[in-house]
Amino acid sequence: MILFLAYSAVIFSFASGSIALVHLFKPEVNKQWVFWLLGLSGLAAIIAGVGGLITSQIYLDTLNMGLPWLPWHVHFDSLSALFYLIIGIAVFSISFYAPHYTHVTQKDPQSFAVLSLFTGLFIGGMLLVLLADDAFMFMIAWELMSVASYFLVAFDHENSANRRAAFLYLLMAEVGALFIILAFGVMASFAEDFTFDAMRVSHLSTMWMSVAFILALIGFGMKAGLVPIHVWLPEAHPVAPSHISALMSGVMLKVAIYGLIRFCFDLLPEVHWEWGVVLLVIGTISAVSGILYAMMQQNLKRLLAYSSVENIGIIVMVLGLSMIFLANHYPEFAALGLLAALLHSFNHALFKNLLFLGAGIIHHQTHELNIDMLGGLIKRMPKTSFLFLIGCMSISSLPLFNGFVSEWLAFQTALRVDVLDDGVLRSIIPVSAAALALTAALAAACFVKVFGLIFLGVPRSRHAEKAKEITDKRMLAAPAMLAGLCFFFGIFPSSILHLIDNVAKQLIGSNLPPQSVLSVFSIAPVSAQQASYSPPLVLIGALMAAGVCFWVLHRNLKTSVRIAPTWDCGFGGLTPRMQYTSSAFTMPLRRIFSPAFLIEETIEKTMRNNTETNVAQVRYSLHIQDHSWIHLYQPVEHGVNHVAKQVGRIQTGNIRTYLGYSLATLILLLWVVS
Amino acid sequence: MNWLMAIIQTALFVALAPLLMGFLKFCKCLLQNRSAPSFLQPYRDLLKLTRKQPVISEDASWLFCVAPYIIFSAMILAASVVPFIAIDLPTSAEADVIVLVGFFAFARFFLALAGLDIGTAFGGMGSSREMTISSLAEPAMLMAVFTLTMTASTTNLSGAIEHVIQEGLILRPSFVFALFALILVAIAETGRIPVDNPTTHLELTMIHEAMILEYSGRHLALIEWASALKLMLYGVLISNIFFPWGIAESFTLSALGYGFLAISSKLIVLCIFLAFAETAVAKMRLFRVQEYLGFAYLLGVLGMLSHIILESTR
């Protein structure tokens, strides 16, 4: 039954894509079927996911597809179910959002068909990755996901920058896939079979295991967007249509995380703490630099993409902690870390989708994504702004919202460091916990900037001034649903934690420590004496406190509020341009963390009448670049170009040379044969 | 019964916060050779503000009016979590010290948004600076707190304090480092000299005041009260974590009385120290603050390392 639902989710998504194709040739077919099928696919995935998590059984199957001697092995366990749930929620919400969005942006039927076809293939590919139980099927599904999403990134291909971003994405995806194939190759050569079952019981030397781990880390890390191999992410995510960016940023990165977890915790026969340290360090670097770069962005979708790098960093970091505890034989704390990482994956999918869909609505209504050109939207788009605020609060990990719970669990995991013996681990883990605190605080600063500059203040451009609330109810329903879930899982985290606990049990064979409490009212991951957090009580307390002070102040209210113009210090003429901008807001942090960026800042002054003091015009330009472009990509690019040039020398363009090559090859082959 | 105790303690905490502010002002005035206002002056100010008609800019949104209530509630919640007179109250189990830091972050988030809401340069300036300073202060604070929680192996404040009491007076190097780190962070977070000057209205230097420049009437009263609460929260946190002796461990009348006396005298001592420091030290340039907070962070790390290297039983 569960497996049937899981299959039907895949089939529905493929069907949704094919309906779009049918619609292209037979326009009488109702276009809405595309979205209904997408919604059904999402719903089936949600039910399959929840069902799989509740029953926490392993469902196995074999499909006779692909090559005759290589049937596809299907394996649906709690881990797959959790990620099925994540994808399901995202797809379900998008099925509400997409109709209006695609209706308005895509007038001609051809582009609609392309968009819907590849969306269907993309979602189906992601779901198949989760079902795969052999390297062959895994790679086919993985490639389906990558290539389909390439066409989605390249959707607005009229713009050359988009084509470039899409090419970079495809290149990185394929290089990443190559590494994954190599990693599976190492495993398969010892297991002597492609099935994951054989890999689980294979006997590898520690050296080969480490090689496989590093290959898998690079491969999945490229897809997940770990620093320094993340640069495709801020290029590719913003150029896709908003609901596709939501899928890519919120969900596709999670599939990469799934791959990493599956490979490290399931396929590799054992884990080593050194790998945990590698994950911890890379995760920390990704988290801190991701949020620092996010802060400096002016394009909203680019900012959100960089913030995904940060969140993936947090997830990988906690996975590293989990691995360290597992290798040191503290499986219950490893379960805690795994719980934190998986919960953060779930939460990040919720709020990042919410924010991307919100960004889509803003773009839709104002045709503007530059933060410095927006402002004052809270009055013009009250509903969107409220939903976006919830997203911002969740991602800034404020209490009462879901982002906080996973971050709190991450801190709790890091604080269990006391049980470890190794001095290096004992000092590196608290420092990374402090980096996590820095990340959280910077994320709050970043999203204060986002919300403050986009929604608050005075409009900075005509587009923003004329913006109106979106009228399509369904387009608002999708972010509303996600915002509701963000709040629900912030108040009742135990509902999902119980389910995720099953994943830990199945994957590493251990639950949370026995004294842990996961009740409706309170969660205590280790024991009630050591740490507890009860969001419902906090909510009640907050409502009581706010209610009492509201009542006291308004009890015998004689004074109403007076509305007056903003005080302009008596000079007059406040203009929207006097407001803080994105670069102004982040200037102190840019200055403090200046070594983290490549900053080009120029101020050009034009003087009036050749005097030195009479300034006519000032021009300020700021250009911030990622270190990894200069220090990693450009050398590689130059190297490849150089090698290509050297190889190109053999192509003289002269027919005689080529005949000579043929002759030489012939002789060589004859010599080899004889 | 326990819940009632918790509510009474929280109410007392909230009610006494302006008094602490008044006392601090009193000490500063004495030290600076000025004639001091009464201790009760902050109450009078608050009362006056609640009676005045609030003036709101025409560019303000609903968030501007709601933010003071959210900020004040977050501070009340924080006050309910921090053990003040007694430990083992049920409210301290509802949230641990990381959640406490989360409450501060919640209040700050809305304060910074409110600063940006009107669309003046001052508000943006204040928000930007506040978020910068707090993002540097938060890791330092958590580092100091982690040192403590690792020693006590709990992040619940009540449990940590109990642990310190049971251990007795041991001079732990890690605690000394953590104490200094936390004091530095507290000064930065509550906007005292040398990081911010609560009495300034000079545009180039103000941080907290810049954000709340547009507030008036009851909204301003709530924000002022919330910042008084924040000062008291840090004061209580520092004194009860590092010098918990005297705090009531049972709910008898005498224990509670002692507890109240103990915390009052601790806070008075702390206030006098703060007044001396604020009188002796000048405010520093904004771009020196990262060095200051970096130092606080370093102290936190040193505390952590000395806990791991010197004190741990393994």
Image: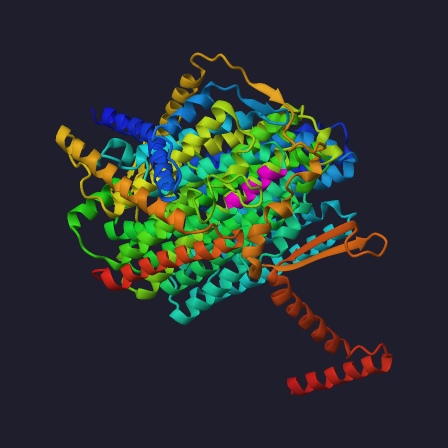
Q: Is residue B136 magenta?
A: no
**Segment colored magenta:** B121-131
* Up-down relation of residue A517 to residue A384 (above or below): below
Q: Is residue A477 left or right of residue B310?
A: right
Residue drawn at (37%, 23%) of the image: A544
Residue drawn at (16%, 30%) of the image: B251
Residue drawn at (41%, 39%) of the image: B104
Q: Specify the color scheme.
A: rainbow
Q: Is residue B130 magenta?
A: yes
Q: How far from the left and from the top, in percent, is residue B200? A: 50, 40
Residue B167 seen in the current view: yes
Q: Give whichever of A471, B156 is nearer the camera.
A: B156
Quarter of the N terminus of chain B within the rendering = top left
Q: Give whichever of A168, A43 is nearer the camera.
A: A168
Query: How many numbered marks are there?
Result: 0
Q: How far from the left and from the top, in percent, is residue A271? A: 37, 61
Q: How far from the left and from the top, in percent, is residue A133? A: 47, 52
Q: Main secondary structure of the magenta part?
A: helix
Quarter of the C terminus of chain B within the rendering = bottom left
Identify the image quadrant of residue A368. top right
Q: How far from the left and from the top, in percent, is residue A293? A: 58, 53
* Up-down relation of residue A533 to residue A234 (above or below): above
Q: Is residue B269 left or right of residue A268?
A: left
Residue A338 seen in the current view: no
Residue drawn at (31%, 65%) of the image: A423
Q: Give whichever of A75, A639 is nearer the camera.
A: A639
Identify the image quadrant of residue A32. top right
* Up-down relation of residue B221 to residue A279 (above or below): above
